[in-house]
Amino acid sequence: MTEPVEYGLLMLILGLVVLLSVPLRQGLRWACLPGMVGFVALGAAVSGIDRWSGVLTPAINDQIEFLAQLGIVALLFRVGLESDPGRLVAQLGRAVAIWLPNVVLPGLAAFALILVWPGFGPVPAFIMGIAATATSIGVSVAPWEEAGALDSEDGALMLDIAELDDLSAVILLGILFAVAPSLKDGMSDGIWSEVALVGGFQVLKILGFGALCFAFSRFAERRLSAVFANLDSRLGPFAFAAGAVFVIAALADSLGFSLAIGALFAGLAFSRDPAERRIDEAFAYILAIFGQFFFLSIGMSITFDGFGASLALATALFVVLSAGKLIGAGLPAWAIGGGRTGRLIGASMIPRAEIYLIVMLHGLTLGAWAVPQELFSAAVVAAIGTAIAGPLVVARLLGAQRQEAQAT
């Protein structure tokens, strides 16, 4: 028998989270902390309260997860929408020279850490390595925007590298979706050839999906958006974009990728539209309602059994995640643009949030053989640490740079 959904309780949760979102974000902003920290902490508190009270039924948890998926789609759509493929191509050489070690080094370092850490194995290490490659654009950009430096040469380079990081991490996430079931039974002699075959086929599918999205962007998107604008000049373009992103996300999910991949590709498809700013502003309202549910669900996935044991691993992960980006991005940026650029770019790549947490949450849903609860809890705590440390360092570096400019 299907458990009835308590819509009243669900509406109460939705209303309270939305009402809390603005004062919570503003309070954290005054404390120079990213909003995700507050919602992950709130989710962890809800998880603790539920263990004591049992108020959240499985049906309510499923509905919160659905709201979280809406948040993921809105979040990744805006990441793609705010990307600038033309500018990225214009300085692709410099960006790629920094992006490649910026992805490889932290990925390998995180893989090695989990591989040698007692109690884990190759599969959790593989998933952690993929997650470690990502950078949070939203968290990274904030101190640059506050300092008015995002339009500088270093700011543009930072944004391009962060976009490449997220694109590659999303593609790796798609490959992970395909190869993870093959890894469940352990590392047999022929497993890597099977993984290579499945992963290669997944790459071809992603490339084909990307080509379809490009064709949609190049030949159909503007025409269809204009049709909707003629029908309703105020809501038409937004309604078309909203419908298209959900359809593209659903198509990606049906192809075995993820909703996140579909949403990101949909955002890239709409990024060339002259109405992009209006669409972006409209989706900001959707994100304001549903975006925090993703981070809330991350916090609710944390359990407090053995949480103390996770802190040592969280500390080690924080060091590896931070050092991997500082060295992987900072050294090549130093070689290209000098010491100041190297420090700024390296520190800006440290934060982990959206895609990093999506990868870890997907691993958790596969089971303990993929991401044990101890690893997930440690990874979330480490992510919070990077999301705090990175922007603080960048803000200080930009502040010192501004003072030097005023002195001269």
Image: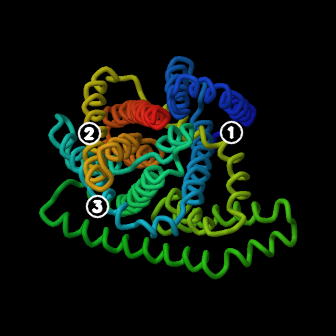
> Can the viewer see residue 332?
yes
In three-dimensional space, the C-alpha distance between marks 1 and 2, rounded to whole angstroms, equals 46 Å
Residue for badge 3: 182
Residue type at mark 3?
Ser
Pick whichever of labels 1 and 3 is earlier in the sequence. 1
Q: In which quarter of the view is residue 186 placed?
A: bottom left
Q: Position of residue 322 (x, y in %)?
A: 31, 38
Residue in view at x 38 percent, y 42 percent: 344
Q: Residue at x 45, y 69 (%)?
A: 90
Q: Earlier in the sequence, mark 1 or mark 2?
A: 1
* Mark 3 burial class by Cα count in 10 Å: few <14, some 14-19, many 20+: some
Give the quadrant of the N terminus. Answer: top right
Rounded to the nearest whole Å, what is the CA distance between mark 1 and mark 3?
35 Å
Disc number placed over residue 5 in the picture, else none: 1
Secondary element type, mark 3: helix
Check if mark 1's residue and mark 3's residue have beta carbons within 8 Å: no
Q: Residue at x 76, y 62 (%)?
A: 239
Looking at the rendered structure, which numbered label has been put on residue 323? Answer: 2
Above or below 185: residue 367: above
Say left or right for 91 vs 272: left
The residue under the point 56% across, 65% down is 268
Observer able to see residue 387: no
Q: Residues within 10 Å of mark 2 (few under 14, many from 20)?
A: some
Please give left or right for residue 146 compared with residue 203 in the image: right
Depth order, front residue of 364/138: 138
User: Which circle, 1 or 2, is nearer the viewer?
Assistant: 2
Of the pair 390 and 36, the residue shown nearer to us:
390
SS at circle 2:
helix
Q: What distance separates the C-alpha of mark 3 from that of mark 2?
A: 31 Å
